[in-house]
Image (cartoon, rainbow, N blue to C red):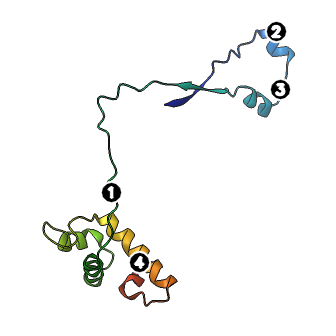
C-alpha cells in the first residue's frame, strides 16, 4: 500500500532572521506548506481480513424480468418491497438484490428507449 506522508520541515527562525525578512501573509502561508513523499507500507499480514470475491454475473431470465415488471407495477420504485414479495426463498427473484433490481430497471429502460420500444412501467425510473 502506498501512503502519502508529509516530510518534516524545520521552519524555525531566530529573532534576527524573523525581523530581517518581511513577507506578505500569502507568501508566509505558502512557505509553510509541507511537501509530501510516498511511503510504501507492507500489509502482507492481513490475517484479520477475509478475502472478498465478486459473485459471477448472471444473465437475467425472461421470468425474472417479468417479475420485476410486475413488482414495479405494484410497488413502484420500492426495491426492497419488490425483493420482499418476489425474492423470498423459492421465488423468481431470490438470487437478486434490491440494488440489482434497481440497476436492471434502469438499464432496461435505457435499452427500450434506445430500441424505440415502449418503456411501459420502466418509465417511472425518470420520475
Q: Nearer the viewer, residue 104 or 32?
A: 104
Mark 3 highlights which residue?
23
x 45%, y 24%: residue:
42
Pick whichever of labels 2 and 1 is earlier in the sequence: 2
Pick whichever of labels 3 and 2 is earlier in the sequence: 2
x 71%, y 13%: residue:
12
Q: Which mark is residue 86?
A: none
Q: Bin the neighbour count of mark 2 within 10 Å (Cα to Cα): few under 14, some 14-19, many 20 and up.
A: few
Q: Secondary structure at mark 4?
A: helix
Give residue 120's position: percent from left, percent from top.
38, 88
User: In this image, 115 relative to 10: left or right?
Assistant: left
Pick whichever of labels 4 and 1 is earlier in the sequence: 1
**CA distance for labels 2 and 1:** 69 Å
Numbered disc in front, either 4 or 1: 1
User: In this image, 36 relative to 23: left or right?
Assistant: left
Q: Quadrant of residue 63?
A: bottom left
Give residue 112's position: percent from left, percent from top.
45, 83
Question: Does residue 127 appear anywhere in the picture?
Answer: no
Picture layout, residue 78 above or below residue 11: below
Q: Secondary structure at mark 2?
A: helix
Q: Quadrant of the C terminus?
A: bottom left
Numbered disc in front, either 4 or 3: 4
Q: Secondary structure at mark 1?
A: loop
x 42%, y 84%: residue:
123
Verify CB contact (< 8 Å) between mark 2 and mark 1.
Answer: no
Picture layout, residue 118 above or below residue 30: below
Mark 1 highlights which residue?
56
Q: Secondary structure at mark 3?
A: loop
Mark 4 highlights which residue?
108
Q: Bin the neighbour count of mark 1 within 10 Å (Cα to Cα): few under 14, some 14-19, many 20 and up.
A: few
User: In this image, 7 relative to 65: left or right?
Assistant: right
Amino acid at each position: 500500500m502506498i501512503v502519502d506522508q508529509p516530510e518534516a520541515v524545520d521552519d524555525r527562525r531566530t529573532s534576527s532572521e524573523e525581523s530581517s525578512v518581511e513577507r506578505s501573509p500569502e507568501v508566509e502561508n505558502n512557505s509553510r506548506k509541507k511537501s509530501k513523499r510516498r511511503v510504501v507500507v507492507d500489509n502482507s499480514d492481513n490475517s484479520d481480513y477475509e478475502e472478498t470475491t465478486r459473485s459471477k454475473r448472471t444473465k437475467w431470465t425472461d421470468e425474472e424480468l417479468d417479475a420485476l415488471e410486475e413488482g414495479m407495477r405494484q410497488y413502484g420504485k420500492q426495491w426492497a418491497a419488490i425483493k420482499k414479495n418476489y425474492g423470498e426463498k423459492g421465488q423468481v427473484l431470490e438470487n437478486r438484490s434490491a440494488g440489482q433490481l434497481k440497476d436492471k430497471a434502469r438499464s432496461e429502460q435505457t435499452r427500450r428507449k434506445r430500441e424505440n420500444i415502449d418503456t411501459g412501467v420502466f418509465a417511472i425510473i425518470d420520475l
